[in-house]
C-alpha cells in the first residue's frame, strides 16, 4: 500500500474517530486492532473497485478527399484522454478494466 493511500485512509479514519489517534498513541491494543480491521476492509473495498472507461476508439478510415492527416486529430486526442484518465485513476490506487 502506498503512503498516499495510507494517508487518505488515516485522514478518513481519524476524521470519523478523532479520539482513536490519542488511544493508539497511548498504546491501546483494542484501538490499534480496530484501526487495522478498518484498514483491511477499506483496502479490500478499493481493490474490488474497477473502473470501466469507454472503449478505445477505432481508427477512422481515410476520407477520399483528405489532403493531410488532420482527420486523425480527434482519434489521437481521444486516445490520449483515455490514457490520461486511466493513469489518474490508477494513481488514486484504483483499477481500470482492460
Image (spheres, rainbow, N blue to C red):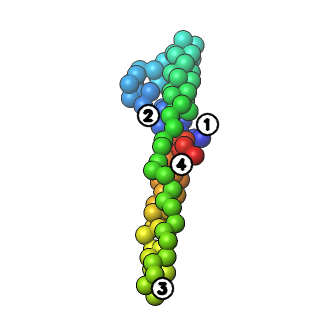
Front-lying residue, 98 or 89:
98
Residue depicted at 45% across the width and 63% down the height:
78
Q: CA distance from mark 1 to mark 2?
A: 15 Å
Instruction: Please provide percent x and percent y for residue 16.
Output: 38, 25
Mark 4, secondary structure of its residue: helix
Of callouts 1 and 2, which one flags the residue occurring earlier in the amino acid sequence? 1
Asked which secondary structure carries label 1, the reply is loop
The residue carrying pointer 3 sits among few (fewer than 14), some (14 to 19) or many (20 or more) residues within 10 Å by Cα, namely few
Q: Is residue 61 above or below residue 49?
A: below
List the residue tagged with mark 4: 91
Name the residue rendered at 53%, 53% in the picture: 87
Q: What residue is disc 3 on?
A: 68
What's the CA distance linking mark 3 and mark 1?
A: 48 Å
| Label 3 – label 4 distance at C-alpha | 37 Å
Element at label 3: loop
Instruction: Determine contact: label 1, label 2, CB under 8 Å.
Output: no
x 57%, y 46%: residue: 98
Q: Which mark is residue 1?
A: 1
Closer mark to the observer between disc 1 and disc 4: 4
Q: Are marks 4 and 2 in contact (CB under 8 Å)?
A: no
Residue with the mark numbered 2? 11
Which mark's residue is nearer the viewer, 1 or 2?
A: 1
Vertical position of residue 32 compared to residue 85: above or below: above
Whether residue 50 is visible to the viewer of this picture, yes or no, is yes
Amino acid at each position: 500500500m502506498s503512503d498516499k493511500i495510507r494517508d487518505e485512509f488515516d485522514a478518513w479514519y481519524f476524521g470519523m474517530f478523532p479520539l482513536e489517534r490519542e488511544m493508539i498513541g497511548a498504546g491501546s491494543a483494542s484501538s490499534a486492532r480496530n484501526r487495522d480491521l478498518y484498514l483491511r476492509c477499506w483496502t479490500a473495498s478499493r481493490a474490488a473497485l474497477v473502473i470501466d472507461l469507454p472503449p478505445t476508439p477505432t481508427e477512422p478510415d481515410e476520407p477520399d478527399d483528405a489532403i493531410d492527416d488532420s482527420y486523425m486529430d480527434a482519434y489521437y486526442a481521444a486516445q490520449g484522454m483515455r490514457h490520461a484518465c486511466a493513469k489518474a485513476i490508477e494513481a488514486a490506487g484504483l483499477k481500470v478494466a482492460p
